[in-house]
């Protein structure tokens, strides 16, 4: 292999060749358009850059957007669409969001044992399939209102993966703690247990999808539910309690309809839901859990108690807004690690792995937002919507945010719109009351319709790209199909609430 071909091969790693070619074409095209279009060059190149960046977000399964999006952002600075000072200003304004991602996500990592304990009890303690599904969805919603949605999904996935492995080993005739085992094939599973294993896969698919939707239902309700919520709250000047009250006219009807939808599709086994937990599987899992409980030492119990106290402190600190959310997260890290004996640097570093790639991507988001601001790209769009009156205006903001959030990242979409409507308020184009209504429409629009695809909802994408997804036969198309009833009903409920209840 020659050196030039090695460079081509290394560019964006294992991404498909057509994807690499597309990104290379984008990078070549932008400066040409900038120069060739004359006085309109910056505007046209800015819109082109935005479309290209949304493409990288929509193709997140092909290549993590940090690298291609980062190259586009770097080029934007180099060709003069924005400048380092503008990028720094946007990033500085989003410091609370960055602190949230860095410290709060890591803090929840140190509450993992408590969450695993709780979800295990739920999974094995509730016998009715419909009740279990609703409880899983509601529990994920409740936790996601205070904790990071990715962490909640990660915990449910950990429980599901552990139970899948236990039964797969049992069905293959091996011991629970067998060191080497291929979970991806049913080659060693006798016909006697294959139907139970297939049913168990269906059960886990449904449970994980209900929990993932639950994170969106809870995530929209509070200031810390999703990263964009904190960004919106900062621009609006809302604390934890005020954010909840402002959004409640939309978030509460959506939550109620979400739980009702969960009940209906499970009861009538629609859209791939309704698979029951086979009695054989339940028996194996109960036996395994009893053995694990018998092995639980006094040290393990002390860990759970400390984590429980820390979780209560977390909720109280957030509720009374005792400090910035990220700093509260840092407090939880200090307390849980100090009192549970986690003092090794490498163990602590493990907690930060999940959030830091997305934190870096978020900084790239704000570089693109700096382009939009410097080139005034969205001002005509926002001005056109602001010419609408009353509830039609808020409804249109909800729809516009929802459509974009279904195909790209909702933090990025929220960043674009909240900065635009705040500028409109400061310039006197809208009053404070209307600004707050539009902020609610942006928050709900970026959170609720985003469940349509894995591209829009981080929890879905996290589940889809996990090692568990192929084991339980959860594909991209199946995920969209299973999310469809939720997407239609919740998006419509949100729109009606924005239109008539705000």
Image (spheres, rainbow, N blue to C red):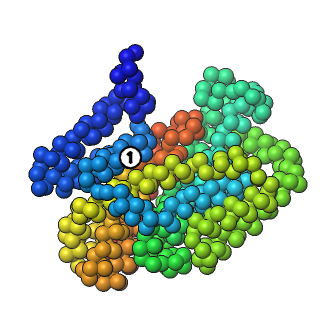
Residue 295 location, x and y as percent? 86, 46
Tell me if residue 60 can be seen.
no
Residue 184 vs residue 15: left or right?
right
Q: Quadrant of the C terminus?
A: bottom left
Quadrant in the rendering for residue 486: bottom left
Residue 101 location, x and y as percent? 54, 58
Residue 182 location, x and y as percent? 65, 26
Residue 248 location, x and y as percent? 48, 75
Query: Looking at the image, which residue is at 74% across and 63% down?
Result: 335
Q: In this view, does 114 lie above or below 393?
A: above
Residue 81 vs residue 328: left or right?
left
Q: Residue furthest top?
A: 1
Residue 235 vs residue 42: left or right?
right
* Number of marks: 1
Query: Looking at the image, which residue is at 69% across and 60% down?
Result: 333
Residue 341 vs residue 436: left or right?
right
Tell me if residue 330 can be seen.
yes
Quadrant in the rendering for residue 122: bottom right
Query: Looking at the image, which residue is at 80% across and 54% down?
Result: 341
Instruction: Find numbered disc 1 in the image and state the secondary structure of the residue it sits on.
Output: helix
- Along the line of sight, which residue is nearer the eye, 378 or 454? 378
Query: Looking at the image, which residue is at 77% across and 34% down?
Result: 176
Q: Quadrant of the N terminus?
A: top left
| Residue at numbered disc 1 | 70
How many C-alpha atoms fall within 10 Å of the one at disc 1: few (<14), some, or many (≥20)? Answer: some
- Along the line of sight, which residue is nearer the eye, 119 or 57? 57
Quadrant in the rendering for residue 103: bottom right
């Amino acid at each position: 292999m020659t050196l030039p071909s090695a460079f081509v091969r290394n560019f964006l790693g294992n991404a498909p060749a057509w994807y690499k070619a597309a990104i290379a074409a984008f990078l070549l095209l932008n400066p040409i358009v900038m120069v060739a279009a004359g006085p309109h060059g910056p505007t046209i190149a800015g819109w082109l850059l935005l479309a290209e960046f949304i493409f990288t977000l929509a193709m997140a399964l092909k290549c993590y957007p940090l690298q291609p999006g980062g190259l586009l952002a770097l080029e934007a600075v180099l060709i003069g669409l924005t400048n380092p000072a503008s990028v720094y200003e946007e990033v500085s304004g989003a410091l609370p969001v960055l602190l949230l991602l860095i410290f709060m996500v890591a803090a929840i990592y140190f509450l993992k044992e408590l969450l695993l304990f709780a979800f295990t009890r739920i999974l094995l303690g509730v016998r009715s399939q419909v009740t279990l599904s609703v409880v899983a969805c509601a529990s994920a919603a409740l936790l996601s209102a205070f904790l990071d949605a990715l962490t909640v999904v990660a915990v449910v996935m950990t429980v599901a993966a552990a139970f899948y492995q236990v039964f797969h080993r049992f069905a293959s005739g091996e011991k629970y703690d067998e060191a080497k085992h291929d979970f991806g094939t049913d080659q060693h599973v006798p016909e006697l247990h294959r139907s139970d294993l297939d049913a168990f896969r269906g059960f886990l698919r449904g449970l994980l999808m209900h929990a993932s939707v639950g994170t969106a239902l809870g995530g929209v309700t509070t200031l810390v539910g999703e990263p964009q919520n904190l960004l919106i709250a900062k621009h609006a000047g809302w604390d934890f309690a005020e954010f909840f009250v402002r959004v409640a006219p939309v978030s509460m009807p959506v939550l109620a309809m979400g739980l009702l939808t969960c009940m209906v599709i499970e009861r009538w086994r629609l859209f791939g839901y309704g698979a029951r937990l086979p009695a054989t599987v339940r028996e194996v899992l109960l036996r395994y859990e009893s053995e694990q409980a018998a092995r639980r030492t006094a040290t393990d119990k002390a860990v759970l108690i400390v984590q429980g106290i820390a979780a209560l402190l977390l909720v109280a600190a957030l509720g009374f807004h005792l400090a910035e959310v990220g700093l509260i997260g840092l407090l939880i890290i200090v307390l849980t690690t100090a009192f549970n004996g986690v003092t090794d640097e490498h163990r602590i570093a493990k907690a930060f792995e999940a959030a830091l790639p997305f934190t870096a991507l978020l900084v790239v988001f704000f570089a693109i937002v700096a382009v939009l601001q410097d080139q005034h790209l969205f001002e005509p769009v926002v001005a056109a919507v602001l010419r609408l009156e009353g509830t039609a205006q808020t409804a249109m903001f909800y729809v516009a945010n929802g459509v974009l959030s279904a195909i790209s990242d909702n933090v990025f979409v929220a960043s674009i719109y909240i900065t635009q409507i705040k500028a409109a308020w400061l310039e006197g184009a809208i009053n404070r009351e209307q600004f707050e209504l539009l902020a609610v429409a942006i928050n709900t629009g970026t959170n609720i319709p985003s469940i349509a695809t894995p591209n829009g909802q981080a929890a879905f994408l996290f589940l889809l790209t996990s090692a568990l997804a192929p084991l339980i036969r959860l594909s991209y198309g199946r995920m969209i199909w299973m999310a469809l009833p939720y997407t239609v009903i919740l998006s419509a409920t949100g729109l009606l609430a924005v239109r008539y209840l705000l």
